[in-house]
Image (tube, grey):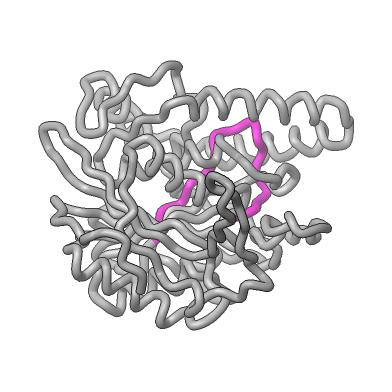
Amino acid sequence: MIELEGVPELIDPVMVAAFEGWNDAGDAASGAVAHLDREWKGEVFAALDAEDYYDFQVNRPTVWLDGGVRKITWPTTRLSVVRIGGAKPRDLVLVRGIEPSMRWRSFCNEILGFAHELGVEMVVILGALLGDTPHTRPVPVSGVTSDPDLARTLDLEETRYEGPTGIVGILQEACTHAGVPAVSLWAAVPHYVSQPPNPKATLALLNRLEDLIDLRIPLGELPEDARAWQLGVDQLAAEDSEVAEYVQTLEEARDTADLPEASGEAIAREFERYLRRRDGGPGLATEGGDTSYLRDTTGGRGRPPRRRAEPPEPGPAAGAEEHGREDHGDEEHPED
């Protein structure tokens, strides 16, 4: 363990975690935690020892210059805290790192040790998968848990997935066995445009997180980045008639599936979100633009698209190739 700063005393803390790698299609999940850390100026207080969990031939360290002095940054997982004021102050513990190469049980126990010491009330783990979803529609985000009581209380799905899993699934189960309430939020990223970043999927995860923990999240430039991303993909699809036809097929399937979900409950949830942003609240910040077209008004309750196999990309920068490369068939939720 590397202690960077003293552990602070926190108010009603929620831990939000994301890990680069297999569970992070389009860097959507790690990008969401990075956004929280950046917007709220998180203070790193601890990091896990990279020697214990990472294969440096898989996740290589980087060398950089600091005033002419060469320094090394090792791949690891860091914990930071953000303090949110307002009428109902609360704190977030952000866990951001890379899926470990080894000793996953020890890794999860170390994360849970911090959660216990800090008095964390709930752990929310963010993930992203590749799926048959069109880039022109709101990003589907599914909320799942292994705890039946938590599923009923927070209107989540109780996971029934069986098959290969990643660190998101392992950490969620470790939380459940330790008696720590845990939720996974999964964003579906279009498999035909899987290259990171995907700001639209990142924004969708933050919107769902905002609803889950009843906390207003400053979005900064993310809505504009999401619009620009969608316009860019629109232009690329328009240049290829086969891709355009395929996207249209996905749109028709999505619209048909979403029709029964346009319920009064979904409309009420969207209106409550609007009121919260209009009236302000914890985490209030000035944000421009309407982001409703980027939201999934179904609440993520529908069946998520299945993961598509993706071929590895050549070269040392192909770390994103792990994102959802395995085909899990028709499971409900991968690795949760």
Q: For this rendering, which residue is in front, 171 or 247? A: 171
**In the depicted structure, whether residue 116 falls above or below residue 223:** below
Q: For this rendering, which residue is in front, 174 or 35? A: 35
Q: Is residue 154 visible?
A: yes
Q: In the current view of this chain or complex, which residue is farthest to the left?
A: 87
**In the depicted structure, whether residue 313 falls above or below residue 107:** above
Q: In the current view of this chain or complex, which residue is farthest to the top?
A: 289
Q: Quadrant of residue 205?
A: top left
**In the depicted structure, whether residue 270 falls above or below residue 305:** above
**Residue 285 at x, y = what percent?**
30, 24
Residue at left offset 36%, top offset 69%: 2
**Residue 54 at x, y = what percent?**
55, 74
Point out the stretch of residues depicted in magenta: 129-144
Residue at left offset 72%, top offset 30%: 233
Q: For this rendering, which residue is in front, 305 or 31? A: 31
- Is 59 displayed left or right of 158 in the figure? right
- Is 316 displayed left or right of 215 in the figure? right
